[in-house]
Image: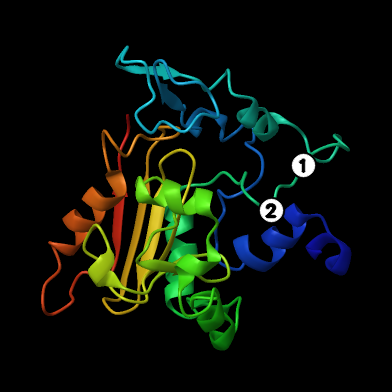
Amino acid sequence: MIEVISGQTLGQFLNQNIFVPLSMGDTSFTVSEQTKPRFCELYMRKGQKPGMLALGQANGEGGLRNITRKSDSLENYHRDPISDKDFFYSAGGGLVGTCGDYLRFAQCMLNGGELDGVRILGRKTVEMMTQNQLGRDPRSGLSRDVAMMSAAGYSEASSDSGFGLGFSVVLRPEEATHLTSAGAFSWGGAASTMFWCDPEEDLVVVFATQLRFRDDFELPLNALLHNLVYSCLTDGKTINKTVMRTRL
């Protein structure tokens, strides 16, 4: 729809309307020759097959294996979208960038669509995006399979949250498995990346790893990170931005 209405590729549209205005200079669908040395390698647990959610199913070999050059999902980053007519601009995932760039986007969303005097979305639009859109009981809008997956802890869907337009949204913090606030909105990535914005605490958190399909049975990163961050907050709310980086 974006490409049809705008007359641009998705990459061109995002660059013109989000990346350039927010000074997100490292965010793109491709990795240039100049930035390739900074491109992080990707890892997976030994015994785990690509595309397989972990959920305790790794065969116990232990350790990690580097899949950077073996993953089909990474080949798109090294193609030329100008000469390659079959280049795929995915609206569901596929951008590459940095923690710094993503922090600017997340801070813009926390600010209601504005950052450093530049506005990319209207305040009411952001309010709608970050409100539950599934009705009174978000669980009624989830399929049985998704509900079962969320019970195991490996999903953006859980009993405490609903879904807005692009984000999961905490509705009942008392049902969460970790410290959080009502109204906090978030999302996660396949390589165990995650971010959330907490309007109540004026808080933005960006967390990045290079571990594809984490195993929440072995290491519940989301819950551990939430508890670590919120336990550091003070009554004065002096901490308003948290960027955490880890390298496996």
Q: Residues within 10 Å of mark 2 (few under 14, many from 20)?
A: few
Q: Quadrant of residue 1?
A: bottom right
Q: Is residue 152 above or below residue 66?
A: below
User: Residue 91's mark?
Assistant: 2
Camera sees residue 155: no
Mark pair 1, 2: CA separation: 9 Å
Q: Is residue 171 above or below residue 187?
A: below
Dot 2: what SS? loop
**Given contact means CB atoms under 8 Å apart, are the residues at marks 1 and 2 in contact?**
no
Q: Nearer the viewer, residue 48 or 117?
A: 48
Kind of residue sitting beneath label 1: Phe
* Residue at x 40% of width, y 41% of height: 192
User: Residue 149's mark?
Assistant: none
Kind of residue sitting beneath label 2: Ala
Q: How crowded is mark 1: few (under 14 residues within 10 Å), some or many (20 or more)?
A: some
Q: Name the residue under label 1.
A: 88
Q: In which quarter of the image is residue 211?
A: top left
25 relative to 175 in the view: left or right: right
* Residue at x 61% of width, y 30% of height: 74
